[in-house]
């Protein structure tokens, strides 16, 4: 039954980080605002960010944020100048969420609870009298003569409205409601959707031995990515071995580069070299190994690495070194020791693929930013249509950058949509 409802509201599609900030900004600017949220609660993806702690933003400079937004970071200049990370931190303090800065300038709530962030934003929405329609999802944007005229929901019901802010997220973590609906709707009204790739996603490896040390986390590893002989990326930090490959912050940070290589040049082999001892150069590490071999000179090789490596990695390194595990350490030849040192600094894995996009933290690709006004987040294709957050072709590294982009674009879109709502114009 296609009943038609008339509303003059700014309708925000999606109650995640970008949608909430868009709704707050529009309401503060005087618009009547309604959020359509397909789940039975707001901020489901925010609840799992930062391992449930919610990495709100990063305390670096605007230039740092743009640099770490590897997908179209420059597009965010205007939005970040309208609402930067300092303003976000102050805002959360003002609404009752004290924040702290941790390693890597990552900003978290002092309570370490993502729920505190979401609940504070919900209180703000209530204070501003933003209407929230739970378990309601948009299926189609209704356009007449190049202008937004309304929406059709999952039941077929049509709602007329003044303007729409599309903040549906990407197509990662579908359990949180990010199922790519926004891409379909935007493309149908004439927008270009750039290739969708997983970003910040774990990698699968050809080597199966990774499963033997699954769960092992290395706090300070240096990783270098090669496509054939060409170095394409590198990183330093924490990594994690899994049953099917590798993950962790440093791996996620260059996964976008890996995905791009695998897609564009599937015939070329992508390898990752892991330096297990990045604090030491080759000569220093050799001296360290000699010291351990001297200390455990009467022991078998298999019992000589306990002070050098995590326990679960020792059998793997022994096997890859080609040195018999039962050989007495004092019988190991110089060339064998040098081969071991080289292995410790160049432990190589071949990437066989990436985990599904549904397991990625962020989607790379989306609504082409060439078709969106960076000052207002307004569509250049359809009047009265605005975008915010991950539905856009923007993405970045872990560390609070993606949430900051969501907050800034949401604020920008909400402010501009309110101006359009008032008849001031925004497109």
Image: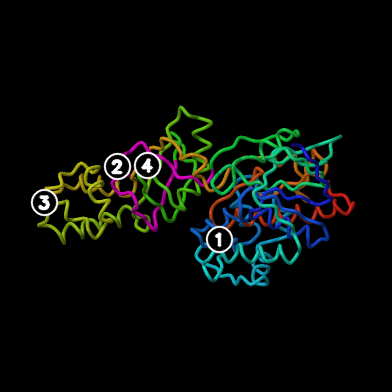
Q: Is residue 370 magenta?
A: no
Kindly report the distance in space between the C-alpha atoms of the residues bearing marks 2 and 4: 9 Å
- Residue depth check, mark 1 versus mark 3: number of the one nearer the observer: 1
- Residue depth check, mark 2 versus mark 4: number of the one nearer the observer: 4
Question: Element at badge 1?
Answer: loop
Marks 4 and 1, the one that precedes in the sequence: 1
Q: Residue furthest top?
A: 267
The answer to whether mark 1 and mark 3 are in CB contact below 8 A is: no
Marks 1 and 3, the one that precedes in the sequence: 1
Q: Which residues, given as a range, are shown in magenta?
A: 199-225
Question: Element at badge 4?
Answer: loop
Of the pair 251 and 338, the residue shown nearer to us: 251
Position of the N terminus by quadrant? top right
Q: Which residue is pictured at 73% across the width and 60% down the height? A: 24
Q: Which residue is mark 1?
A: 55
- Residue depth check, mark 2 versus mark 3: number of the one nearer the observer: 2
Q: Residue 14: x percent and y percent?
A: 67, 49
């Amino acid at each position: 039954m296609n009943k038609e409802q008339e509303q003059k509201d700014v309708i925000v599609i999606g109650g995640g980080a970008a949608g909430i900030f868009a709704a707050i900004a529009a309401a503060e600017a005087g618009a009547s605002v309604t959020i359509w949220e397909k789940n039975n609660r707001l901020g489901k993806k925010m609840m799992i960010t930062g391992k449930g702690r919610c990495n709100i933003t990063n305390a670096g400079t605007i230039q740092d944020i743009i640099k770490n937004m590897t997908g179209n970071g420059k597009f965010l200049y205007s939005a970040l100048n309208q609402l930067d990370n300092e303003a976000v931190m102050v805002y959360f303090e003002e609404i009752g969420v004290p924040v702290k800065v941790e390693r890597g300038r990552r900003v978290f709530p002092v309570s370490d609870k993502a729920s505190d962030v979401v609940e504070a934003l919900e209180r703000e929405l209530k204070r501003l009298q933003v209407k929230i329609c739970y378990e309601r999802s948009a299926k189609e944007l209704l356009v007449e003569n190049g202008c937004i005229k309304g929406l059709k929901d999952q039941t077929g019901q049509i709602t007329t409205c003044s303007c729409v802010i599309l903040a549906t997220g990407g197509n990662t973590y579908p359990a949180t409601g990010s199922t790519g609906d926004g891409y379909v709707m935007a493309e149908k009204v004439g927008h270009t959707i750039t290739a969708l790739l997983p970003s910040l996603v774990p990698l699968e490896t050809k080597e199966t031995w990774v499963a033997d040390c699954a769960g092992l986390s290395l706090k300070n590893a240096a990783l270098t990515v090669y496509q054939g002989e060409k170095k394409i990326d590198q990183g330093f930090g924490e990594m994690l071995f899994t049953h099917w490959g590798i993950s962790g912050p440093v791996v996620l940070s260059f996964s976008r580069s890996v995905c791009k290589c695998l897609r564009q040049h599937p015939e070329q082999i992508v390898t990752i070299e892991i330096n297990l001892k990045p604090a030491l150069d080759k000569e220093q590490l050799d001296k360290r190994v000699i010291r351990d071999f001297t200390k455990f000179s009467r022991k078998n090789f298999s019992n000589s690495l306990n002070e050098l490596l995590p326990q679960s990695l020792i059998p793997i390194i022994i096997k890859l070194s080609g040195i018999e595990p039962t050989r007495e350490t004092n019988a190991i030849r110089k060339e064998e020791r040098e081969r071991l040192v080289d292995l410790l600094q160049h432990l190589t894995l071949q990437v066989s693929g990436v985990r599904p996009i549904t397991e990625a933290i962020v989607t790379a690709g989306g609504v082409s930013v060439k078709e969106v006004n960076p000052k207002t987040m307004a569509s250049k294709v359809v009047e009265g249509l605005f975008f915010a957050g991950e539905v856009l072709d923007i993405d970045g590294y872990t560390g609070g950058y993606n949430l900051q982009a969501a907050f800034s674009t949401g604020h920008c879109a909400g402010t501009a949509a309110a101006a359009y709502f008032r008849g001031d114009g925004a497109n």
